[in-house]
Image: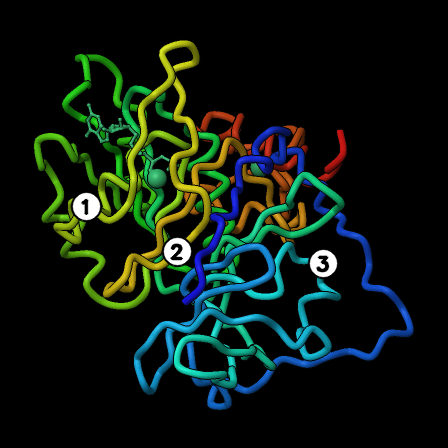
Amino acid sequence: MGKFKGGSDDWLDDEDSSSGRAQLRAPKKGKPTVDFLEIDQSNGTVVEVFPNQCVVLGDEPKDRFACTYRKAKMPNAEARERSPVAVGDRVRFEKMGSRDGVIDGISRRRNMLARPAPERAMRHVLSTNVDRLVIVAACAKPEFSPGLVDRFWVAAQSQEIQTILVVNKIDLFEPGDRPWTIYTQIGLPTIEISTKTGMGIDQVDALIRDGVSVFCGHSGVGKTSLLNRLSQREIGRTGEISEATGKGQHTTTGAYFIPGTSWIDTPGVREFGLLDVQPEELKKFFPEMQGLACEVEDCLHEAESGCAAKSLFRYASYRRILESLRSPDA
Ligand SMILES: Nc1nc2c(ncn2[C@@H]2O[C@H](COP(=O)(O)OP(=O)(O)OP(=O)(O)O)[C@@H](O)[C@H]2O)c(=O)[nH]1
Ligand SMILES: [Mg+2]
Ligand SMILES: [Zn+2]
């Protein structure tokens, strides 16, 4: 396989993408529409994506092929995605020799985790066809960020992807509030871990045995450290936290399957804007907001009088997300 210059996702985080830009430009009119293939028409899985090419793991033989694209056969050009394929896509490819290939079709996706890319109203698809999202956060360095957890969890629920929350760096925890404990109570299983001491790793391991899991979160929280621990190999490069900002420095530059596993490492994001979620349906993805005794029928939990959601722990977060869905460019 040829040598790749690793593509970088860093540029995506230079701007705030949580504000959405959720209104992606409509597909160009008049162009022929390319459809997705049926799932049984595929013969490989995309395991890593680079500018202008990607790596496909063939079903038979189970080898890695560096693939380019038959652009005219790619349905995603019209959906304005950053790359013709995303990690997790099932594809049909034609082998060209023992190490290379050309992709000429993508199978319909079961689901996808995507956010608005800050540039040119495009979608950044983190991964597709996953069974589980593992949201990785840190209790410190960087500080626990409930807003990002809430957004990832909404995105996953809207795609019917099962989710767990992992709170890493427990070795750095100083006695005080543990704001993540509420998540278990409202239906998001939460595990405290330390990749340094090994605490909680077995518990995570037990939950991710089946299916494909994608690991997401801020930069520097320890996604790659956790995956190195779980796979008992030093596959991914891990980075230092900046002394100046207390944040990670984007050590992982693109999503990829850890070889030999069904686990996807992703680069840290600063923000996660939501796509394809309507303001009216947001409350569906806050389990603690179901069946409340609000005075107004079909209360949106916004500013209605007698709203029972106001006292909930995540009410402010809900309102912020709702606002961003209403005015993505604000
Ligand atoms: N104290 C402590 N440090 C940890 C722990 N886990 C990871 N770190 C450190 O945190 C830093 C960032 O870890 P990474 O695994 O590179 O984080 P990441 O989430 O993969 O970051 P990106 O690839 O930038 O998204 C490294 O210096 C790790 O050594 C932990 O449990 N405790
Ligand atoms: Mg990493
Ligand atoms: Zn209400």
- Depth order, front residue of 279/298: 279
Residue ID for mark 3: 80
**Residue 320 x/y as whole percent:** 60, 29
Residue ID for mark 2: 256
Farthest-out residue, bottom: 40
Identify the element where label 2 is drawn: strand
Residue type pointed to by label 3: Arg
Q: How is the image coloured?
A: rainbow
Residue 234 disc label: 1
Q: Earlier in the sequence, mark 2 or mark 1?
A: 1
Q: Which image quarter holds the C terminus?
A: top right
Residue 129 location, quadrant: bottom left
**Residue 141 x/y as whole percent:** 31, 20
Q: Is residue 291 visible?
A: no
Answer with left or right where residue 72 lies relative to residue 238: right
Q: Which residue is at 63% across, 48% downward?
A: 298
* Ligand 2 positioned in quadrant: top left
